[in-house]
Amino acid sequence: MSTTAVSAQKLAELDPVIEELGFPRDPDNLYLQTVSTMLQAADIIDLKHRVKIILAQPKNEIMVHFPVRMDDGHHRLFKGYRVQHNNALGPYKGGLRFHHNVHLDDVKSLAFLMTMKCSLVRVPFGGGKGGVKVNPREHSVTEMERVTRRFCSAIMNSIGPEYDIPAPDVGTTAQHMAWFADTYMMSNEGKDANTGLRVVTGKPVEFGGSLGREKATGQGVVDTLVELLPEVGLKVAGMKVSVLGFGNVGSWAARILQDMGAKVIAVADHTGAIRSDSGFDCHALAEHCRIEGGVKGFPGDTITTDEFYQTPVDVMVPAALEQMITSREAQMIKAKVIAEGANAPTTPAGDRILAERGIEVVPAILANAGGVTVSYFEWVQNKTSSYWDIEQVDRELNRHMVMAARRTVLARQKYGVDLRTAAYIAALEHIGKAYSVRGIFP
Ligand code: GLU
């Protein structure tokens, strides 16, 4: 694999846009890392300076504080974010994360990645992301419902079905989207109340959701792999897989890969790591996680996290959080291909080591774009008061994923870069064209 990976640190010294915008120089800062990687790709295609500075910062950063009544009667104050990165190609779009470690710079990075992702898979949306600093595991269902509804009300005037459309992310599910949409619709009652249904995607199928949305991100990971694996002489049937994080993305990718004949032999999450040389029953493991809250206790050999990374596999799917594969993990990994199910799971330092070791990385803006793609289908179905059957959803998703993968491979061939840089290039070329025809107001 060829690579032009340059360290974020080096870029921070070099890139005039980083200088011009006065970014903090902390090399561990996720926002600096993601924007530096984008600027590296932008330089290769000589993207206009004005587009670079626009994309290097979000348009709007919204921060709210709101009180919520706990079950015992006392109130707690929560901090929430909604970052609207870019809407040159369509309404802001991206998930809402409920996690105790949500910070503004992380939400900014994730919003930025949504802009890139939507552009790469050619869905007519921009990028956004939001979150609430809360540990859902510490709260009852009723408390989480009140957090969701009160957060919706706090940001309601800044979002909308044609302006900014949230969706599930880490710590949120279809149920949270149902509460969110209900709150929005009840607060905007009037002749056109049903338009409000489209304010979020990832809703339950019984309430405006799309068939295939729940598994969509995992399905997209698999569709991308099926398209790209032949390039490295691999095929899904019979291959060995490890999965980091067994939430929505990891568990669906694992279940679909298993159904296609792959063997998932190692899994790790926040509760522990397990291995089975004969391969796990991922359907049973997903059920175990639903009841127990994690992989711990599922039949298999208990291993350490380091042993998880060291397990020899064909494909590893990191589907947990950002920055999990640093230089340390990158040294240990024994995979031929890494398919990034999570957003930004690999740090630039980790990326460099993987490249040196010849490990192919399918970048997140490609590999995990299936979720937002089916979100777009859901939004279209709501807008046209129609329902697609699962065959139509899967077929259209596959078409978007395959085209995005081919665009990425073409950019790699044309510019002689790694897949991550190529995916950024394919996304940036599209946005760059939109800016050149639209111009910059006034
Ligand atoms: N949270 C998902 C992501 O990071 C989905 C976003 C969406 O459907 O809008 O891609």
Image: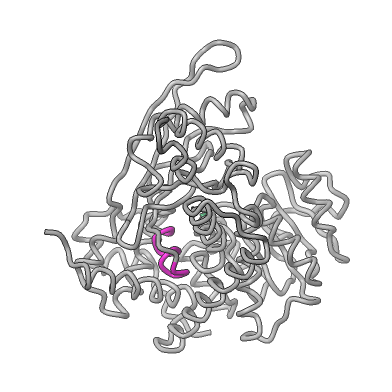
**Against 286, is 420 above or below?**
below
355 inside magenta stretch: no
Q: Give the quadrant of the C terminus.
A: bottom left
**Against 167, is 316 above or below?**
below
Residue 319 picture location, percent across and down: 62, 57
Query: Residue at 80% across / 46% down in the picture?
Result: 287
Query: Residue at 66% across / 69% down in the picture?
Result: 222
Residue 297, image quadrant:
top right
433 horizontally vs 263: left or right: left
Q: Which residues are magenta?
A: 113-122
Residue 167 picture location, percent across and down: 51, 47
Residue situated in front as seen by the camera: 167 or 426: 167
Secondary structure character of the magenta stretch overall: helix
The furthest residue to the left: 442
Residue 292, image quadrant:
top right
Residue 423 picture location, percent across and down: 45, 74
The furthest residue to the front: 191
191 horizontally vs 355: left or right: left
65 horizontally vs 326: left or right: left
Query: Residue at 36% across / 31% down in the picture?
Result: 64
Residue 62 visible in the shown view: yes
Residue 29 visible in the shown view: no
Residue situated in front as seen by the camera: 388 or 433: 388
Residue 96 picture location, percent across and down: 49, 43
116 inside magenta stretch: yes
